[in-house]
Amino acid sequence: DAGVTQSPTHLIKTRGQQVTLRCSPKSGHDTVSWYQQALGQGPQFIFQYYEEEERQRGNFPDRFSGHQFPNYSSELNVNALLLGDSALYLCASSLRTGSLANQPQHFGDGTRLSIL
Amino acid sequence: KQEVTQIPAALSVPEGENLVLNCSFTDSAIYNLQWFRQDPGKGLTSLLLIQSSQREQTSGRLNASLDKSSGRSTLYIAASQPGDSATYLCAVRSGGSYIPTFGRGTSLIVHP
């Protein structure tokens, strides 16, 4: 049973460029959330996708956008990259049943994004 | 706005010690609190999830308690082992939103 997979594992970009990160949820899961984790910090919620729509969004600018595909996989896009966007980007999947607050989330190993 | 603080930030102990990691939060109107483990360069692994109506949860050598009124949770690790070395994070889901707020974590090293 495959867990959450993310690609690529590492990425180096320069300021002003655009980047796309990918996530495949755990088998049977239909909801994907994205988090940004700066070095030495806890993860910060970016947004969550369910039924191919953004359902909740954290305090991130519009440069951060996403997409969910019919097979439940998801992409995170970041435009006009800044040095401060350097971080580990984590994807988590869950099954949307019952209370949203009680969905157990399974995390991938993340994509390490470095901005030069 | 919910704020989550974890103390200590780092801990180094010899193998076999019993440990207590602390997590405090500012808004007691929570849905649940979850403890995670994160190995270097890896994602998060869920350890224990405590609902707001519960006082504690146990899994093997781990025990997590929750005191909503005081805004605190503790993670107790019994008989620590080198394999327990990792960063431990707590996350709180507050009323009105499912969005979790994470602390910065406690970095634990258990040396043989």
Image (cartoon, coloured by chain):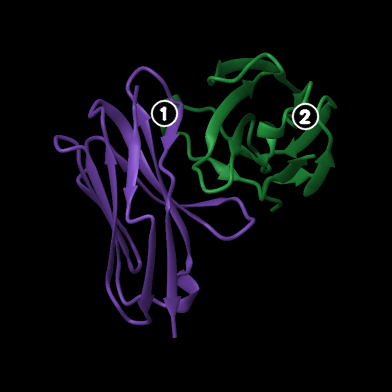
Q: Which residue is mark 2?
A: A71
Provide the chain ID for the residue under circle 2. Answer: A
Tell me if mark 2 has few (under 14), some (14-19) or many (20+) residues whose alpha carbon lies within 10 angstroms of its own.
Answer: few
Residue at 81%, 30% in the rendered image: A15
Chain coloured purple in the rendered structure: B
Q: Position of residue B101 (x, y in %)?
A: 42, 33
- Give how far apart the Cα atoms at labels 1 and 2 are: 23 Å
Q: Nearer the viewer, mark 1 or mark 2?
A: 1
Left or right for B34, reference B19:
right
Quarter of image, res A94: top right
Q: Which residue is mark 1?
A: A101
Residue positioned most to the left = B69
Chain coloured green in the rendered structure: A
Q: Position of residue A74 (x, y in %)?
A: 74, 29
Provide the chain ID for the residue under circle 1. Answer: A
Tell me if mark 1 has few (under 14), some (14-19) or many (20+) residues whose alpha carbon lies within 10 angstroms of its own.
Answer: many
Left or right for A20, reference B67:
right
Q: Amino acid at mark 2?
A: Asn
SS for tag 2? loop
Q: Position of residue A112 (x, y in %)?
A: 72, 46
Residue at 60%, 23% in the rendered image: A47
Q: Amino acid at mark 1?
A: Ala
Say if A94 sits above or below A79 in the image. below
Q: Which mark is residue B33?
A: none
Residue at 67%, 18% in the rendered image: A51
Circle 1/circle 2 CB separation < 8 Å:
no
Left or right for B61, reference A106:
left
Q: Position of residue B59 (x, y in %)?
A: 35, 61
